Image: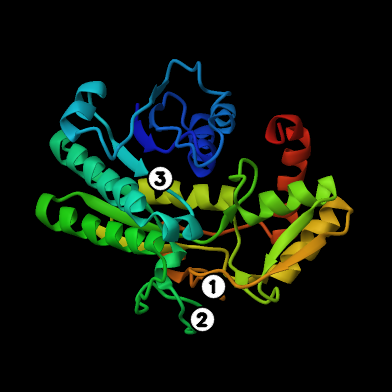
Amino acid sequence: MNHYLITGAAGFIGSNLTRTLFKTEPGVKITCIDNFDPFYSSSIKQFNIREFRDNPSFTLIEEDLATISAENLAKKIPGNVDVIVHLAAKAGVRPSIENPLSYQQANVIGLQTMLDFAKSKGIKQFVFASSSSVYGINDHYPWKEEEKLMPISPYAMTKLAGEMLGHVYNKLFGIRFIALRFFTVYGPGQRPDLAIHKFTKNIIAGKPIAMFGDGSTSRDYTYVDDTVQGIIGAMNYTKTDFEIINLGNRYTISLKELIEGIEKVTGKKAIIDKQPDQPGDVPKTYADISRARELLGYDPKTQIHDGLKKFHDWFVQHEAMLTK
């Protein structure tokens, strides 16, 4: 029986990962650490874990990794842990510009706590959620993992710091560290602050949506089920001791095209509120996923229209809870 420790498991990606593991690995045990950060409503996170909250194989620990010590955390989690998946982080490029210190505390010190916990417990497999934002402004598309990194937001800088902190712990203490650079993950359960969620909600309600810039910025949107499969591949990866791997969808969609896609699945026309470009935002993201294919068997399947429809159907089904 495998025991997985997933931080941020009540969040968007974490809850989808947890749900998939319970469905695909009979007998698995999962411990979740989440501090229910007020960045968005904790009721949404509680909703995310409703299906397995009462599962005897699921344990929820509500703690802030930036303030608890690794020693005290070890007291709360007795016994062996096979893999740590560290998804917990303070999210958002734009808010990080307003309060950079809080991002250092949550994203760097929180990771430090988990690595010290792994060291003390002898846990040898550590999967870390990094971000495509570490690439910054870089026109060498598609981005390979070896690109020169020039982050342009405090959030992105903390993710790059996390990758290097993992490298240190790999070299000093033999912890296998796999950093996954996520590219704009979307799908059922997506955070309410992200574009697809906000746009779908407002278009359905007949409210304006903010379009920053001229709509030409583009993103490599990755459906959450594909991201989850990449994470599971990293959880089982043993060939090398340190890797940085892109998890994207190998093509990019402009903001205008995204809005048109949401209009199509909602059957409603968007009311556009044009806004200036935002500091910290990059003009384009585009992943080279050759390494993920080779090392993890990663093969994203979901095209943007299908993914938008699945998100729309989920949103409509749970609209009362999501809009209260």
Q: Amino acid at mark 3?
A: Leu
Residues marked 1 and 2 touching at CB (< 8 Å)? yes
Q: Where is 324 relative to 251, above or below?
A: above
Find numbered disc 3 in the image and state the secondary structure of the residue it sits on: loop
- Nearer the observer, 93 or 78: 93
Residue 155 horizontal/vertical position (percent): 40, 59
Q: Earlier in the sequence, mark 1 or mark 2?
A: 2
Residue type highlighted by circle 1? Tyr
Q: Residue at x 59, y 28 (%)?
A: 47
Q: Position of residue 72 (x, y in %)?
A: 19, 27
Q: Which mark is residue 155?
A: none
**Depth check, front residue: 280 or 87:** 280
265 to the left or right of 178: right
The location of residue 129, given as percent across then percent down, is 39, 52
Q: Residue furthest left?
A: 172
Residue at (85, 50) in percent of width and height: 206
| Residue at x 66%, y 74% (from the top left corner) | 213
Reading the image, the residue beneath label 1 is 286
The answer for how far apart the CA atoms under marks 3 and 2 are is: 26 Å
Q: Is residue 48 left or right of residue 262?
A: left
In the picture, which quadrant includes the N terminus?
A: top left
- Label 2 element class: loop
Locate residue 269, reporting x and y percent.
87, 59
Quadrant placement of the C terminus: top right
In the image, taking residue 187 as reference, residue 156 lies left or right, namely left
Determine the CA span between mark 1 and mark 2: 6 Å
Q: Residue at x 77, y 49 (%)?
A: 202
**Label placed on residue 141:** 2
Label at residue 87? 3
Query: Which of disc 1 and disc 3 is earlier in sequence?
Result: 3
